[in-house]
Amino acid sequence: MSPWRLAARRFRRNRPAVRGAAVVLLLALGAVAAPLVTADPLAQPDPVRLQDRPPSLAHPLGTDPFSRDVLSRTLHGARVSLVVGVGAALLAVTLGAGVGLAAGLAGRRTDQLLMRGVDVAIALPRILLLLAVFAVWEDAPAAAVVGLIAATGWFQTSRIVRAAVLSLREADFVVAARAIGAPAAGIVRRHLLPHVAAPVIVSASLDVGNIILLEAGLSYLGLGVRPPTPTWGNMIMDGKDVLLSAPWVALAPGLALVATVVAFNLAADGLRDAFDPRTAA
Amino acid sequence: MTGATARAPLLELRDLAVRFTGPDGVARAVDGIDLTVAEGETVGLVGESGCGKSVTTLAILRLVEPPGHIAHGSSVRLEGRDLLALGPKEIRAVRGNHVALVFQDPLSALNPVLRIGAQIAEAIRAHESVTRSTARWRAVEMLAAVGIPDAERRAAAYPHQLSGGMRQRVVLAMALACRPKLLLADEPTTALDVTIQAEILELLDALQRKLGMAVLLVTHNLGIVAERTRRVYVMYAGQIVEEASTERLFAQPAHPYTEGLLAAIPRLEERRARLQAIPGQVPPATAWPAGCRFHPRCPHAWEKCAAEEPPLLDAGARHKARCWLVEEPMRRKK
């Protein structure tokens, strides 16, 4: 049985991880189907009478201070969270893997140059940097949020990949591949990448939860993806003033946020244990 | 034999030196060795761990990685062609195609996430422009040739599904897939059970005869050397300290280190309480002793040995030893 299938089997046997993955899947489904099954998240049917209404048949999760449907907004908010979380994590991991591979394979000088750069970058205060940029860049599109979060989030991955490449380079099977005259590109593709893939996938999946939280933090402060586009961050912001009179406004996106992050982290832990059974608790 | 002497040997190392730059200074892991292997010949390269055997095999294929490097003035010739002068593409065309390498540990020499058939096919596709399916078919053939039963089905197996002996057969199949003229076998049986060792060596013998290739057998096992080789080089502290025909080396070793190695072989007929061992250890490669590198451990050493490094001295009958005793046999202690 292939090592990938073995990992898949170990993952399937890990119940919390499978549940986490199921929640993620469900959420993704909801986010994709949001425009089909719910009302327009921007519609303000009756700003006076429908303000802060409790859950009802017409509005299963109630309405917010602007009379908008909270369920619709929560599902639409999932789109932003998922796109930013998954998109930025993928992009960050690709960047990190690229730099890590380059540093691990290149000569000492390039390696030192890249890694000292990473040392400096890792010391930058990420949140302050993002706050500053988006405070100035008021109409930043979602792609910019993804890009900037990724650009400030690949450093750890590059270290992981570089370390893996450095130890793999010395591995007998890599030397053996060189000894049979395999071309360098083939060695990277067939002998290095499959072995760094596991730690990279784990690192990416652990990142998703953090990035979702980061994005929610930014949009809570009104930065990044801005109102009226619903994000969980700006929905919680809208709900904070009516927290006692209409708790559902903040609670719906808040719970969605917590559930999503927990689900991603459970799935990520499951992936880590599946790829490396020795670390399983 | 007149024509044969004029022809260039298959492999010829001249003054091959490999240095590693480390925090403790420069390690002269391989320090100027001369070695030849003729076509079809089996040559032994013997020595303790850390004497530079493995680095020598890596250097032949230019697989030494920084911080190690092959020193200036070294020469590695394959059929007269200077391998050290080749470009990256050209040396790659030599690796696996003309000269192949087999490692000690068959498990770590195979990629755990690739099917074994694919790993053998990789060797074929590295040198011949054949289709995927042709390479695969030849890989199965190769597996059958190294005595793997049910080769077609086994080609789809992963390394962890095979026993140690089977894995070493796969490693051999990978190395021999392109019918190299020379096989560098670095302790090919050390990681295996004794019974499997014999099987693998038999297989190697059979393949060697079939393919007409030469083998440089690197080992610390003198039993294997006695059985399988015609000529032997003994390596100590990065140098060749003795070279002779296998028969001669075992009958009358000229270097005290070789004598020590031979005395360290346990024998059934002599029931000694303790095994004979060579006192001391191989010194670190950053600080080889002055004079003869073996003199601190040598039972016969005298002042000259500490002061002056002996060259490889001619002991007759194509037998050479790096020991002053060759010139002054009277100094030998009883």
Image (tube, rainbow, N blue to C red):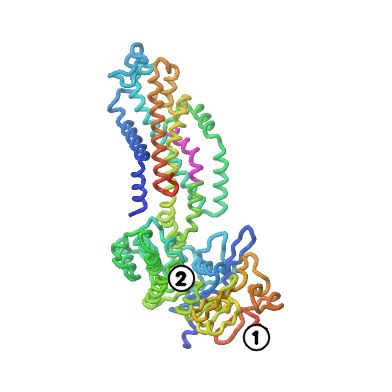
Local packing at callout 1 (Cα closer than 10 Å; few below 14, some 14-19, many 20+) is few
Q: Point out the residue furthest to the bottom here.
A: B2
Q: Chain of mark 2?
A: B
Q: Which is more foreground, mark 1 or mark 2?
A: 1
Looking at the rendered structure, the kind of residue marked 1 is Pro
Which residue corresponds to mark 1? Answer: B329
CB within 8 Å, label 1 to label 2: no
Q: Residue at x 65, y 84 (%)?
A: B327
Instruction: Compute the Cα span from label 1 to label 2.
Output: 35 Å
* 1 or 2: tag closer to the N-terminus: 2
Image quadrant occupied by the C terminus of chain B? bottom right
Q: Is residue A120 above or below residue A195?
A: above
Q: Residue at x 49, y 72 (%)?
A: B218
Local packing at callout 2 (Cα closer than 10 Å; few below 14, some 14-19, many 20+) is many
Q: Is residue B45 above or below residue A2?
A: below
Estimate the x, y position of residue A16 in percent, counting from the top left. Answer: 37, 38
Q: Which residues are magenta?
A: A143-158
Query: Which residue occupies the foreground of this view, B156 or A158?
Result: B156
State the image quarter where residue A27 is shown. top left
Horizontal side of B53 relative to B309 (left or right) equals left
Which residue corresponds to mark 2? Answer: B185
Horizontal side of B150 relative to B28 (left or right) equals left
Q: Is residue B127 visible?
A: no
Name the secondary structure under disc 2. strand
Name the secondary structure under disc 1. helix
